[in-house]
Amino acid sequence: MSIRETIARLHSRGRFGELGLERIERLMTRLGDPQDATPAVHVAGTNGKGSTAAMVEAAWRAAGYRTGLYTSPHLTDWRERIQVMGRPIPPRKLAAHLAVIEAALAEGSDPLTEFEAWTAVAFLHFRAEGVERAAVEVGLGGRLDATNVMRRPRATAIVSIGLDHVERLGGSLGSIAREKAGVAKPGVPMVVGELPEEALAVVREAPRAVGAPLFLAGRDFTYAAQGPNWQFSGFGRELRTMLALVGPHQAANAAVAAALLLTSDPDLKSESIEAGLAGVRWPGRNEQISREPEVWLDAAKNPLGTAALRRHLDEAAPGKGIRLVFGCLDERDPAALLAPLADRVEALLLVPIKDERGLTGERLEAAARQVGLMGRLGTLPEAVRFLEETPAGQVGLATGSFYLVGPLRKLLVAPRRRR
């Protein structure tokens, strides 16, 4: 089975089913509970959970552990979602694990979803590869997410909470917080980042109800950052390093990552944590891919994300107008995504995403007008030229979706374009 055929078979399972753990729990039992074979941390949040998981994995790898990382969505290659020692799962192993899952499913009639299948593959792969530490990112919510089949992770985290996926998680910060706090486990430390008060009030209750130690940003650990220079205090440690991932929100994510590492591995050396935070690679997130012209890519996909992106640009490129490439999925509110950036946009190219869920050009144009912008429609190749022609005094930027930034990044950093 080719990699294309394997991915197609995963797609055929459908993106969403009824939220719940029953299907994945029954499958894990048939597979010998691979989710319990690998020591792992479980990372939830509206934004920043992928970056935080990547930082944790990088620090463990710097310490000499054999590491695993499970995240979603991917940027350019589906196999990026499941990594061991920083390398995506090989095609033949992905196909082999999927075959094992399909054989196990033949014993029952559970309609496993695509994400549940990916999650099962990740746990099988980590077990087969002898992974000693894994960072696992929640897909959607937490309480009923397939990754929550882990019965006793080493630690859990909630990085941030904002309004997103309201149709499935609820329309208030409190309801969303309740779902994400469902990753709390009895006796397992929970690390919580900086949250709105409405969300924090709900989150505090979950670890208390199950008897989980709770560690809060600002109370149990603190951080400070000046550009990439970052320092952390907590758990009897003082850390200082230059962060590889830039932006004020990444400094906050790094603090949660450090707290996760120190609660899950109290004896981990400070040097390993600092090296991991300084060396982690996480493309497409506040990534500067060119200095002349100045071009940034960020896969922000909700208003919380584009607001964080705006704060970063105010710090990294103060006073510069934005030459913006934008596109998003139909499930998003494009005007709300554009609003935090609108007053700095000087030129706008709207690129409909080539996906069945991509927002149409007509609706992208209407959203731009809603926030006072006029943009023209374009294609990915036109977006490449648009960004490469960013004049001095402006900053080129592409944002709105992984499904835009990933393919665009592939074109922009192709070897034939390197100078």
Image: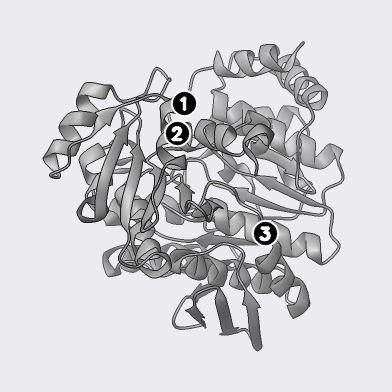
* Circles 2 and 1 in contact, beta carbons < 8 Å: yes
- For label 2, the residue is 385
The answer to whether residue 71 of the structure is visible from this angle is: yes
Q: How is the image coloured?
A: one colour
144 left or right, relative to 200 = right
Q: Residues within 10 Å of mark 1 (few under 14, many from 20)?
A: few
- Residue at 66% x, 27% y is 27
Image spot of residue 11 (x, y percent): 56, 17
The answer to whether residue 192 of the structure is visible from this angle is: no
**Label 2 vs 3, first from the N-terminus:** 3
Image spot of residue 350 (x, y percent): 30, 32
Of tags 3 and 1, the one toward the viewer is 1
323 left or right, relative to 413 = left
Which kind of residue does numbered mark 2 sit on?
Answer: Arg
- The numbered mark at residue 280 is 3
* Kind of element beneath mark 1: helix
Image spot of residue 245 (x, y percent): 57, 62
Q: What's the distance in space between the residues labelled 2 and 3, CA to CA?
A: 29 Å
**Label 3 vs 1, first from the N-terminus:** 3
In what quadrant of the picture does the N terminus appear?
top right
Q: What's the distance in space between the residues labelled 3 and 1, CA to CA?
A: 29 Å
* Kind of element beneath mark 3: loop
- For label 1, the residue is 381
Q: Nearer the viewer, residue 2 or 384?
A: 384
Which kind of residue does numbered mark 1 sit on?
Answer: Pro
Q: Nearer the viewer, residue 401 or 223?
A: 401
- The numbered mark at residue 287 is none
* Circles 2 and 3 in contact, beta carbons < 8 Å: no
